[in-house]
Image: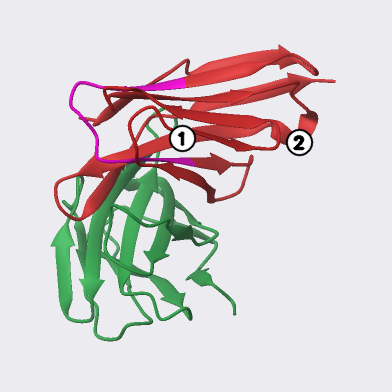
Amino acid sequence: GQQVMQIPQYQHVQEGEDFTTYCNSSTTLSNIQWYKQRPGGHPVFLIQLVKSGEVKKQKRLTFQFGEAKKNSSLHITATQTTDVGTYFCAAPYGSNDMRFGAGTRLTVKP
Amino acid sequence: NAGVTQTPKFQVLKTGQSMTLQCAQDMNHEYMSWYRQDPGMGLRLIHYSVGAGITDQGEVPNGYNVSRSTTEDFPLRLLSAAPSQTSVYFCASSPYPQPYYEQYFGPGTRLTVT
């Protein structure tokens, strides 16, 4: 089974609305990564969070790592059509691999 | 740099056939991995390698073989294709073994088994 649970599975927003996806783990994570996959494309690395309570921003994207390091979120402010795609979180599993969440597919209506 | 390349882009196989999906990277990355992506299930790790000559199983290794004879190449072999192996396959590489470094993904191979 998957290491991390990601919600929601789908999100449809009007352009200009905000969007948030969440990743939850039952165990404490050493770090968490976020990737974006455009329709028909391949996953592209966005960011990695390592510290408890860490918050990182990339333009309109805000990434948070929970204080207990068991959850993380990605928030997009004022979505644009270029934000369309599936957003995945990925967390360590064992010593040498990462397990991906099921992803949140974001669609944006112009 | 070409990054991570995969061939072929598309493939149709009949049940029972075997084939090899090719993956190469020109970034001198030690870590390489293979994932399959099915609708609603995210990316699932099939096999990975932490360096030439070293491979290990991931979450869903059954029906697949890998080898890593060079740093650059990491082919994935389907031994006897089954319809359940219909999926999109992604190869990825990273400078160092996971889980603390970003992975660079190839463009993918879309495989259909009939």
Span shown in magenta: A22-34
Residue labelled with disc 1: A88
Task: Give the chain of mark 2.
Answer: A
Whether residue B81 is visible to the viewer of this picture, yes or no, is yes
Query: Where the N terminus of chain B falls, by quadrant?
Result: bottom right
Q: Position of residue A76 (x, y in %)?
A: 64, 25
Magenta stretch contains residue B41: no
- The percent coordinates of residue B64 (x first, y second) are 22, 59
Q: Is residue B10 above or below residue B1?
A: above
Q: Is residue B60 left or right of residue B30?
A: left
Q: Residues within 10 Å of mark 2 (few under 14, many from 20)?
A: few
Specify the quadrant of the image occupied by residue A27. top left
Q: Residue at x 23, y 58 (%)?
A: B47
Residue placed under numbered mark 2 in the picture? A82
Q: Establish if A22 lies above or below B114.
A: above
Can residue B82 be seen here? The reply is no
Where residue B80 sits, quadrant-wise, is bottom left
Up the image or down, B16 lies above or below A21; here it is below
Q: Disc 1 residue type?
A: Phe
Q: Amino acid at mark 2?
A: Thr
Image position, residue B52 (x, y; %): 23, 81
Answer few, some or many: residues within 10 Å of disc 1's Cα (few below 14, many 20 plus, some between 14 and 19): many
Say if labels 2 and 1 share a chain. yes
Identified at 54% across, 72% down, the residue is B3
Look at 32% across and 61% down and name the residue there.
B33
The residue nearer to you, when weighing A16 against A107, is: A16
